[in-house]
Amino acid sequence: MGDLVLPTYEQIKSSKVRMGFLMYALRITGLMYKHKVNEGWERPLRAARAGILIIVVFLHLLNNFWQVFEFEMVHKERSLVIFFWLLQSFMSMCFLVWWQYKGRTALLIHILPWSDLKQSYQSRRKVTLLVYFGIAGLVVIMSVFAFIGNMLYPDNPVIDRAAVTPFPNFLRFVSYFIVNYAYTVWGAVLTLYCLVLVVIHEEIRSLNTSIQEAGQSPDHLKLVDELLILHDRHANICYVLQEADATFQVYNFSMLTANIPTAIFTILSCYHAFASSDKFNISMCLMEAIFCVVETLGLTTMPSKINTALQNTEKAIYNNRKLWKPYQADVYNLLQSFITQNKQPGLGMSAWGFAIVSKSLILTTVSLVVTYLTLLIQLSDSPGEAGELFKRFLNSTNHANSTVD
């Protein structure tokens, strides 16, 4: 197992080339304090900078929490959406620093099979990076929209200023910048998560192709050697996947958990915006909905594909009849060992070890969101006492305390 942990020089060189842009995107967040071998006094300074950035975002998160749950607001549901996005951004910042402290980021980047990747990885990598640029651009656009909307409609602002900033007048720009920075960090960490899983998925697909093509030679010894190489390659993939799961399982669980109320209140905000026919509100809500869709796809698509690819590995072994006929005891035992290794418990990307992220888990999550969203919509439209209490909490018209002049 020690040989698997220590990366070779070629792995390190290849990872630096393939991960160059991502590492740059992570460094500009100001949170990467361990990205050089010989640093001296620079590392404590970078660690202090990361700590200050986390504290600043945390203070804005506390302000948002206090304003949302203490005062009445015009757009309570949108303020809740901002709170949950800030919460996810803050958690992403903490995870990124924690992974560096435990050495997880360097380990993952170095042990991934970069040199074996095919050209198909390049297209997936470009799509992932384009999504990152899109997220960063969308954050800026949303901030501009919110600023313009609050200027055009001071009596009915697009967002409640107090939910974003504790500062008055021109100092609000400081808070807008901090919130945009926090969202950008969230996008960078999600991009890291997606790219690591894209690499693992591509390697599993490549392995499945090699299994399907195995057994072409009638030479028995050559077949055994070929299977041993594939078996060892599969063992390395299992190790990398287990390390990735150990790194991301708490992150995955936290983001999925926080994304459920975020999606619910975002869609509820869209429902009210469309009901009011306010174009500015509709535009803001649609951009918020795009964030929720991107996060849901990013957190669930690649883990689900990895789970499916592992199932296809077993199918590839069974369907390649050249490996099974004629019967050879040593080949048969090797194939059984291969299948057992692929069926080991917990192999895949999990949500804090509770469950492997698969299509069934995604469907369950979507069903949960739809169920609670339906309940909230019914409460918001209910003429009874429960509906009045919900409306009083969610859409109060008394917002004297929600603006800071």
Image: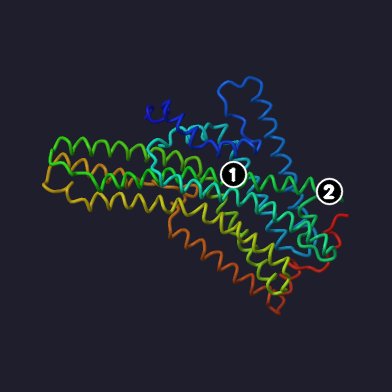
Left or right: 230 with respect to 323? Answer: right
Task: Name the quadrant containing residue 273.
Answer: bottom right
Q: 220 or 14, which lies in front?
A: 14
Q: Residue at position x 37%, y 54% from top?
A: 308
Closer to viewer: mark 2 or mark 1:
1
User: Which residue, given by chain and number where applicable, does mark 2 sit on?
Assistant: 167
Q: Amino acid at mark 2?
A: Phe
Front residue of 67/288: it is: 288
- Marks 2 and 1, how far apart in space? 27 Å
Q: How is the image coloured?
A: rainbow
Q: Amino acid at mark 1?
A: Ala
Q: Which residue is mark 1?
A: 188
Image height of 347 relative to 46, above or below: below
Q: Upstream in the sequence, badge 2 or badge 1?
A: 2
Number of labels in the image equals 2
- At 38% from the left and 31% from the top, the residue drawn is 4
Q: Point out the image quarter for the N terminus.
A: top left
